[in-house]
Image (cartoon, rainbow, N blue to C red):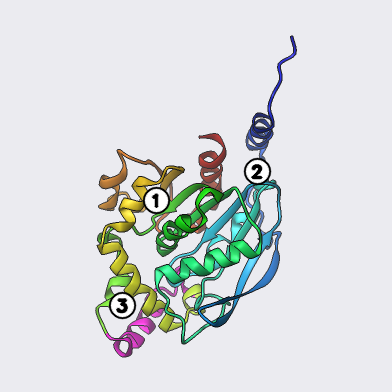
Amino acid sequence: MRPSFNKKEITFVICFCRYLTEKNKLNKNLPISSMKIIEVEYANTKLKIAADFRRGKEDSLVFIHGLGCSKDAFLHAFNFSFFNDFSILTFDLVGFGDSTKAEEFSYSIEDHAEVCKLVIDKLSLNNIHIVGHSMGGAVALLLIEKLRQRVKSFISLEGNLVGEDCYISRKAAEVSFDEFKSIFEKIKENNKNSPWYNMLCKTMPLAFYKSSCSLVEYSDSNELLRKFLELKIKKAYIFGEKNAKMPVLEKIEDKVKVFSISKSGHFMMLDNPEEFYRKLFEIIVLN
């Protein structure tokens, strides 16, 4: 008797075969995507959000970058064929990268999440897998509450969950904005050899400062940890091998699937993109 397969099983087999037969190493060319400026309005402020986007089939991958970063943190996301069927969206949060630098925006984690939802709504994305890095992990947890059933999974990339996750953000939040301006220049100077540097140079100091203040407040409250652990959707936490002693790992490793990326630190998706994106695929499709 010939076996029958439903649509979900067929999709799984196709994706799994792609995974097994993937032979291409990282494509050194620019991501195969279209540059977009997505215009939205929030709190009576018109915003232009810089994005890289590729329309796929039913499932969508949405990447949210961290503090002082940009969509360039995920520039390799478009280069692996096992994600060919996915819509992929990377974009710059307000005040970061090439998006609007708005003096009047609050830069709270909550408002970042609201703008993210507007962007996702504008593109009519569903069946969403959200990947949040560092501060982007905190933004993602609030965004998931707004998108509800549209989200299928969440992968935190050393995303903020507890107070100990705040280092540079806490240093920023402890001083006035005027004092922070000189600190920000030192942060850039100290990271000239880091993948973070070019993204920092496109960051509005006020956005960094106000986002830091909000991020520290959320992280210290333990609300982010609670939200993460209580998620009913598929979830996972990924960290760079060099950060294996982070205090937060002891609080989540018995409750959440935790994965390490070798030869990498906080920017695991840039330090070791091939291993990172393969692991991301495994978590989303195979696990």
Q: Dot 2: what SS?
A: helix
Write down the quadrant of residue 90 in the picture: bottom right
- The question of residue 157 being in magenta is answered with no
Q: Check disc 3 and report the residue beneath it.
A: 172
Q: CA distance from mark 1 to mark 2?
A: 22 Å
Question: Which marked residue is nearer to the observer: mark 1 or mark 3?
Answer: 3
In the rendered structure, the answer to whether residue 89 lies left or right of residue 154 reads right
In this rendering, position of residue 121 left or right of residue 232: right
Q: Which mark is residue 82?
A: 2
Residue furthest to the right: 2
In this view, 279 is above or below 142: above
Spot occupied by residue 193 in the image (x, y as percentages of width and height): 45, 71
Q: Earlier in the sequence, mark 2 or mark 3?
A: 2
Residue type, label 3: Ala
Q: Main secondary structure of the magenta part?
A: helix
How many discs appear? 3
Q: Residue at x 71, y 16 (%)?
A: 3
Place residue 32 in its image quadrant. Answer: bottom right
| Image quarter of the N terminus | top right
